[in-house]
Image: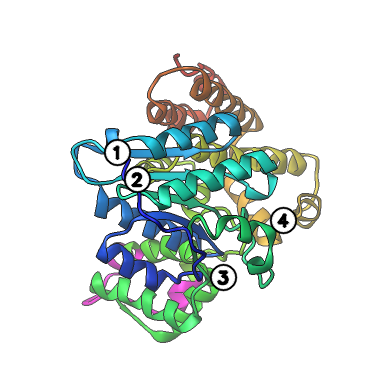
Amino acid sequence: MPEKKQNTKSAILTPDALAVEIKNGALGSYIFFGEEDYLKTHYRDEIYKSIMEDGFEIFNYFPISFSPAVQTKEEAMSRLADAVQAIPMMQDKKLIVASDLALASLSKDLLDALAVSLRRANESDDTVCILYCRADELEADYKFETSALYKKLSPSAKLVQFDLQPRGKLISWTKRHFTKETVLMTDEAAGALVDLAAGRMTPLSFEIEKLICYAKYVKGGEPPRIEYEDVIKIAVPSEQDEVPFAMLNAAQSWKLTEILAVFNTAREKREEPIVVLAGLSRILLDMLMIKTASEAALSASEIAKVMKMKDFRVTKYLSSIAKVPLSVIENAVRLAYETDLALKSTPQDPWLLLDTLAVKIYAPKSLRSAESVTASPKI
């Protein structure tokens, strides 16, 4: 594999600087970290589009999850080393995306191996390697640049920090989405929406889509217009640690079409199926615990205290499961567990397994009887 000399520690890049690199031809190793996960996903996808030619991704795209639900960290590290050494086929570059590393938990040997793979990818003329660290996997505080982890990895890769965006910038970004769809939005409404989303782009993007649909197909008008009152009526408040809104809203709607739409979006964004299932499973478990506590006559505030949730989140859960029998929720948790086993032990298409799970849980008859959804996914 051809190599170039590129082993000096560099300053932390901004997303704007990364955009310039993508335009000029991204190359080498990048470590994505910081609080704004939406931008990490956006720039990961931009790099993918800049590199990958249609039909050749099977040879040149290497998504590697370090989640213990997928494989051991040693196995994942070996896969990463092999991917770095692989030669692109029928195009100039290959792309590696490593995720779920939980860097702080890596042993010294695994961290050394990671640094070696990142350095080799960084010195290559045909490889782009992205180390994708979610906000909860690598803390980007003022101490980071003096940490042992930074000193270990910075000579081997370019670090890109994705901070939360300023409120004014988010308001402009929000209004552009509405303008593109020929929907008017007041400054007051845009500011309220940004605040309800806690300044985070992922929940904000979901609420934007929801409000655009509301403006066009419910409220109407020529042109349709979103006011402050519409935002308060339709949008759902978020916290910094809120689970992704699309999955949460779809799961709580108990509508098959909505949960399938979330799965389709995750598939298009090349999310790992096991991670998508984990998100749904967490929501179902929360439903089960809240339903059980409710039937034991605990109040919403008492449940919130026990589960360390905000009152409004518990209230929303209680509303979504008010007419859903406990047996249906118990069965949904069991089906999710069985699907998890199938994902880890069979060669069957993982997205087919997830779609099958969605049908078994969210088909309308599942709200009437747990017996109608007791069949396990076929494996």
Q: Pointer 1: residues within 10 angstroms few (<14), some, or many (20+)?
A: many
On screen, residue 316 above or below 359: below
Q: Residue 265 bears which disc, if any?
A: none
Bounds of the magenta span?
A: 214-232
Residue 31, given in percent of the width and then of the height, sits at 49, 56
On screen, residue 5 above or below 262: below
* Picture colour scheme: rainbow
Q: Residue 198 bears which disc, if any?
A: 3
Q: Residue 60 bears which disc, if any?
A: 1
Q: Can residue 282 be spotted in the picture?
A: yes
Using the image as rendered, state which of residue 34 and residue 271 is in the foreground. 34
Q: Amino acid at mark 1?
A: Asn
Q: Pointer 2: residues within 10 angstroms few (<14), some, or many (20+)?
A: many
Mark 4 to mark 1: distance in Å? 43 Å
Picture residue at 27% right of the left edge, 60% below the top: 25
Q: Pointer 4: residues within 10 angstroms few (<14), some, or many (20+)?
A: few
Q: Can residue 322 be spotted in the picture?
A: no
Reading the chain from its start, which is encountered first: label 1 or label 2? Answer: 1
To which residue does mark 4 refer? 309
